[in-house]
Image (cartoon, rainbow, N blue to C red):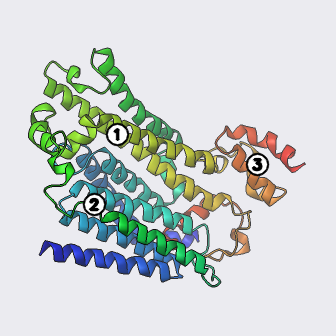
Amino acid sequence: MKRYTRQRHRVLQVVTKLVIPFVLMFGLYVQFHGDYGPGGGFQAGVIFAAAFILHGLIFGLQRTRQVMPPSVIRVLMAGGVLIYAGTGVATMLLGGNLLDYDVLAHDPLHGQHWGLFAVELGVGVTVTGVMISLFYAFASRRGSDEAVPTGPGPIERGPTERGPTERGPTDRGPESMS
Amino acid sequence: MEHVVIMTLLGFLVVIAIGIIVLRDLLAAVALLGLYSLVAAGAFVVMDAVDVAFTEAAVGAGISTILFLGALSLTSHEQKPRGNDSLLAVAFVAITGALLIYGTLDMPHYGSATSPAQTHPELAVRFIERSAGEVGPPNVVTSVLASYRGYDTLGETVVVFAAGIAVLSLLGLRRRRTLDSAPDDAPGDTPAAEPHAAVGYASRSAAGPIAPSVRPARDPESSA
């Protein structure tokens, strides 16, 4: 299985490496251009997470975890909500109502601009973290629950590969899609 | 002309939905679900709701499909053959659908300029006329979502966060930590070393979200 992954999916791996930077850049564009065109934090977060999920599907969960460790994801999930709620608290401390961005700068329009920026960033960060963690949670079950009989699996595995190998189980991503 | 396009897309949606119901091959059904979202996104674009279309394409056609595929890789690709469909279930679905269609009869017609949302002085008219002066961005949808309804969006973000927390506490994020990083950590943690498969599953899912160092201490208890 490991051998198949390395050899049969080489084209996919090369193309993925080429595509991922553009996906990330498009995610940033959607995030910060949402004021002027379609898009915003939610869509940007999903696109940003899609880049990491693509990486996980092609290169295996193990390597994606090195790029984006689960500890970072948990910080992202909570951090986005904190950014959003913190903006609301900041507006209250500056004398306005909750999430009344007018008070964030001397000019109300500038304040609104800062407020929108911070709030959309919070949404994007949280959505990115949650989407990646959903993928991790599903994908990591594939390898770890092999000892649990869950009925006839779609992919037959030899008895030698049943053990918890270092990378084998998570490398089944691309094959399950074919 | 626009109505013809929309009707065609909606017809596609019906056909795809029937296909999803009929198909036994779950992989094909998941692919059709992605297609359904893509066609729905196309319909939203024709209706000038680009932000909604964007979300539908990214979430419905993208992330959901991948999550379904991830779930499918845990189970069989083939739906189990069912017995005869219960007449009660068919009747229930038919009645519910009829009630939903009956409910839409009260809705304003598609594109109606006299619907309450269009004519109410504090809704669409006000946002379109004054959001540029009050909030700034030319995309009124962003102004409404993040500023006028910022409190609601905060709630939505918290809901997304809560959903993530729920999945993590059910499935766990760092289940395979000992295999990932620390070979010197917890020798009895690998699934092959579990004495009983079901007990191992229970103890691992119980200790999953907590610190992994708890697991070796808990395993002897739960297997005893």
Judging depth in this view, the residue of B16 and B127 nearest the camera is: B127
User: Is residue B113 shown to the viewer in this render?
Assistant: yes
Which residue in the structure is indicated by mark 2?
B107
* Residue at figure coordinates x 34%, y 66% from the top left: A15
For the residue labelled by badge 1, is the local secondary structure a helix, a strand or a loop? helix
Whether pointer 3 and pointer 2 mark residues with C-beta atoms closer than 8 Å, the reply is no
For disc 1, the chain is B
For the residue labelled by badge 3, is the local secondary structure a helix, a strand or a loop? helix
* Residue at figure coordinates x 21%, y 57% from the top left: B50
* For marks 3 and 1 on the same chain, the one whose residue lies earlier in the sequence: 1
Marks 3/1 same chain: yes
* Residue at figure coordinates x 57%, y 61% from the top left: A170
Residue B178 sits above or below residue B85 on the image: above
Marks 2/1 same chain: yes
Report how far apart the C-alphas of labels 3 and 1 lie in the structure.
38 Å
Rendered image: mark on residue B203: 3
Mark 2 or 1: in front is 2
Report how far apart the C-alphas of labels 2 and 1 lie in the structure.
26 Å
Which residue in the structure is indicated by mark 1?
B153
Mark 3 or 1: in front is 1
Left or right: where does residue B113 sit relative to residue B92? left
Judging depth in this view, the residue of B80 and B88 nearest the camera is: B88
